């Protein structure tokens, strides 16, 4: 079954997560229309290769045209309009940067797969594998039971109110009838004393006394029922207060905390549908009780007497129910989707000036009568004017469509929401470069800002001011500030659930290694299929904290995490790690997902696990010395005496991986030994996976030769020799007479010495033979190795530098 069809069959809570994956940058409608074709493309490869991304993007536009033709034949005007709008948006946004749309689609497809995997795992394991899930389920069952009890009590109260009204109508009729006949109720009854004041005190006939007795009994029953209703209403309001605190202080607060965690890469947050159902149910019950309290006032105005419980208790009941409803409505106004730039979906809460960002607010009270009634306004730093002046923070204006009316049509699940898709920030310029005052303690990536959403609700005679705000955001002016800005978002949301602490970084709290380790693992698991294991995290702990037996509970300061350089390095821990994360996502994602990259491992541990292995066993790890992020491989070999040696190649960086995939580098890597013979030192990926099995599938297959005209199967068109670049590390003895400065000057081994360097060399035919047999006579200069592959043979073509080339 196609992936998209499987997704449509998931439960509502998973569908809500699916809805959050899509926005204008890649509309869900397009995913639906072109589902089979989209799933057949290799978006991950396109995201890393511009030429392939361009091809796929133009094919995408072609598929849109074909789908448009189908809608044209079906005379589906709405779909035609939507598809035309989508195509225009894609062309205007991604025509010059097709890799961006490829990255967005690749991430959506991957998130869909994670969603399916989570749903399948949950269905198979149930809650038994998750003790905390069992506790939450029990709490939810109790909460639902309490809500059902409230609904039942409200309905019972409705029946009692009808009984009260009927009883009062009977009493009122009999009283007025008796009064119209001129008979006076006796004064002996304390309840009827007020009713008898205006009546004649003459002696009553036996029939009249009987009527008066009946009237007294009716009034006594009326008083008793009124007192019962008032008492039960007070108890019902107390039950509503208890359930409301559970909803807002526990369930909604837990959801907001999970949203924080999801923003920094943690497990996906559950959807709001269930909370919306609960809160809407409670709000409906509260409004019903409020109407019943108003009905009590109407009844009291018709019939009242000394000691009337309605007069005594109704005002307090009215005040209580209004306070509960106001509080519930204010709590129910939430930011469903935090501010995020569509081009950086994995790093929300970081906004670049001049770049559009999106967010979504939602009212968890689903009243149809409020549809298109609430106008939302967006403001930045509403309450922090004085604080901003003290801190010297920058000030911003919100541009774009900053007002919108909440409605139920735009949301896929019919919720009352408003999504802002076209907001941008512009800095207010001051004389000192935008900062109102000088404050050297905070850099711009430590400034926190709040985006506030406000509106007014007019409902059943009540006016309620609603306001909610985003989690604190960091505003940058240059994309190079993204790493440090994201570090600030991680640190804030890791250590606090305070929603408005914009002064957090004036004195940032310390974190423990346990907290940091979990967040670091999320940085990988949220964008790939793998987080970090214990050994990898232990290596990172050693980088941050130095050698230790147990890192649990060790404290890490904000400065050590992000600002101070690591020991012996010219860069901080976070800068180094963030570049590795970027390297993984853009260049070696598939290998990381397969678990082929050991990644973070100390050199001592590396030697310990490789030494017992046979020659040719290798592992892949990240460079500890490359600020920009690098990956290398280390292998086992034996020297002439049979002694085990561990060798590592110079790390490959993003610049080199732009030219050749890491899998192809591994498959083609050679060493030129002392006899000038090319050998491959890489045989088995640790522990014992054949190299071809692990990496062969990630290398592009060679195209079949083109047949000659006439269909002769034995004749092919071969105008040029095919070429294939490989990476070669020369034996140190080959270049022993060339100082490092000369090698660097010739541009062969940038930044390395000849002993551990691999690069792309041109390799050659005739002179290679002379190099291999006449090394002493022909001192080989800088080489570039190029393998020319012929259909049935392998030809090596070597070009020597002009000063050492032998005559042809």
Image: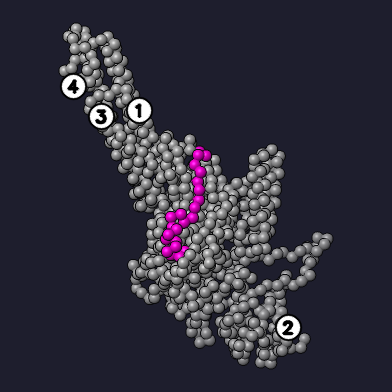
Q: Return the mark for residue 270.
A: none
Q: Nearer the viewer, mark 4 or mark 1?
A: 4
| CB atoms of marks 1 and 2 within 8 Å | no
The secondary element bearing badge 4 is classed as loop
Q: Which residues are magenta?
A: 371-393
Q: Nearer the viewer, residue 543 or 415?
A: 415
Residue name at image x 64 percent, y 70 percent: 659
Residue 172 visible in the snapshot? yes
Residue where numbered disc 3 is placed? 309
Label 2: few (<14), some or many (≥20) within 10 Å?
some
For the question of whether residue 675 can be seen, the reply is no
Mark number displayed over residue 766: 2
Identify the residue under disc 4.
Answer: 190
Q: From the image, tell me which residue sits under label 1.
A: 295
Indicate the position of residue 609 as horizontal and vertical percent values: 45, 74
- The mark lying in front, picked from 2 and 4, is 4
Task: Provide the secondary structure element on which disc 2 rests.
Answer: helix
At label 4, counting other C-alpha atoms closer than 10 Å, the crowd grade (few under 14, some 14-19, many 20 or more) is few
Q: Which numbered disc flags the more N-terminal residue, 2 or 4?
A: 4
């Amino acid at each position: 079954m196609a992936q998209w069809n499987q997704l449509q069959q998931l439960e509502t809570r998973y569908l809500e997560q699916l809805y959050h994956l899509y926005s204008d940058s890649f509309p869900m409608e397009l995913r639906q229309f072109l589902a089979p074709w989209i799933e057949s493309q290799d978006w991950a490869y396109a995201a890393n290769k511009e030429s392939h991304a361009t091809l796929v993007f133009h094919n995408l536009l072609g598929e849109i045209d074909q789908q448009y033709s189908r809608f044209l034949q079906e005379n589906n005007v709405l779909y035609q309009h939507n598809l035309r709008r989508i195509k225009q948006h894609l062309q205007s946004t991604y025509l010059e940067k097709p890799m961006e749309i490829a990255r967005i689609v690749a991430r959506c497809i991957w998130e869909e797969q994670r969603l399916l995997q989570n749903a399948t795992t949950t269905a198979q394991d149930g809650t038994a594998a998750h003790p905390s899930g069992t506790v939450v389920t029990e709490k939810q069952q109790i909460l639902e039971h309490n809500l059902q009890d409230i609904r039942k009590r409200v309905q019972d109260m409705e029946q009692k109110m009808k009984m009260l009204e009927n009883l009062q109508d009977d009493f009122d009729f009999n009283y007025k009838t008796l009064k119209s006949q001129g008979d006076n109720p006796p004064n002996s009854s304390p309840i009827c004393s007020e009713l008898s004041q205006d009546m004649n005190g003459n002696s009553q006939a036996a029939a009249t006394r009987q009527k008066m007795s009946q009237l007294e009994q009716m009034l006594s029953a009326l008083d008793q029922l009124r007192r019962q209703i008032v008492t039960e209403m007070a108890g019902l309001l107390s039950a509503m207060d208890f359930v409301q605190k559970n909803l807002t202080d526990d369930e909604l607060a837990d959801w907001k905390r999970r949203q924080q965690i999801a923003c920094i890469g943690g497990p996906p947050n559950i959807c709001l549908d269930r909370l919306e159902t609960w809160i809407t149910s409670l709000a409906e019950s509260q409004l019903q009780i409020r109407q019943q309290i108003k009905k009590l006032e109407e009844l009291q105005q018709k019939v009242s007497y000394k000691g009337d419980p309605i007069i005594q208790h109704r005002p307090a009941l009215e005040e209580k129910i209004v306070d509960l409803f106001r509080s519930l409505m204010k709590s129910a106004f939430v930011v469903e989707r935090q501010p995020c730039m569509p081009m950086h979906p994995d790093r929300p809460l970081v906004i670049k000036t001049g770049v559009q960002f999106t967010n979504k607010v939602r009212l968890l009270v689903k009243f149809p009568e409020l549809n298109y009634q609430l106008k939302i306004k967006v403001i930045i730093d509403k309450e922090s004017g004085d604080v901003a002046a003290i801190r010297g923070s920058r000030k911003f204006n919100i541009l774009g469509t900053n007002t919108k009316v909440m409605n139920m049509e735009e949301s896929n699940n019919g919720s009352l929401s408003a999504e802002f898709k076209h907001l941008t920030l512009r800095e207010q310029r001051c004389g000192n470069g935008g900062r109102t005052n000088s404050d050297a303690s905070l850099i711009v990536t430590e400034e926190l800002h709040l985006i506030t959403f406000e509106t007014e609700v007019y409902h059943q005679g009540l006016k309620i001011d609603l306001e909610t705000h985003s989690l604190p955001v960091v505003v940058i002016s240059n994309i190079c500030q993204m790493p440090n800005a994201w570090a600030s978002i991680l640190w804030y949301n890791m250590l606090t659930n305070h929603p408005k602490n914009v002064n957090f970084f004036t004195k940032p709290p310390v974190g423990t290694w346990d907290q940091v380790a979990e967040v670091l693992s999320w940085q990988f698991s949220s964008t790939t299929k793998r987080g970090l294991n214990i050994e990898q995290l232990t290596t990172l702990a050693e980088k941050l904290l130095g050698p230790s037996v147990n890192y649990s509970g060790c404290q890490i300061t904000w400065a050590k995490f992000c600002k101070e350089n690591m020991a012996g390095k010219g860069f901080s821990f976070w800068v180094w790690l963030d570049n590795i994360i970027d390297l993984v996502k853009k260049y070696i994602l598939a290998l990381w997902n397969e678990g082929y990259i050991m990644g973070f491992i100390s050199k001592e541990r590396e030697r310990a696990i490789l030494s017992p292995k046979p020659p040719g066993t290798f592992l892949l790890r990240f460079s500890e010395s490359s600020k920009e992020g690098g990956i290398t491989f280390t292998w086992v070999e034996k020297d002439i005496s049979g002694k085990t040696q561990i060798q590592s190649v110079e790390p490959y960086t993003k610049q080199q991986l732009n030219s050749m995939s890491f899998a192809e580098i591994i498959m083609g890597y050679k060493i030129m030994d002392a006899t000038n013979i090319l050998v491959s030192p890489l045989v088995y990926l640790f522990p014992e996976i054949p190299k071809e099995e692990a990496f062969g599938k990630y290398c592009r297959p060679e195209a079949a030769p083109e047949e000659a005209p006439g269909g002769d199967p034995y004749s092919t068109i071969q105008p040029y020799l095919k070429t294939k670049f490989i990476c070669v590390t020369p034996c140190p003895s080959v270049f022993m007479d060339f100082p490092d400065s000369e090698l660097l000057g010739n541009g062969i081994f940038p930044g390395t010495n000849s002993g551990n360097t691999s690069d792309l060399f041109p390799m050659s035919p005739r002179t290679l033979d002379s190099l291999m047999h006449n090394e002493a006579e022909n001192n080989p200069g800088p080489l570039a190795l190029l393998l020319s592959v012929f259909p049935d043979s392998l030809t090596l073509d070597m070009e020597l530098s002009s000063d050492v080339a032998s005559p042809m």
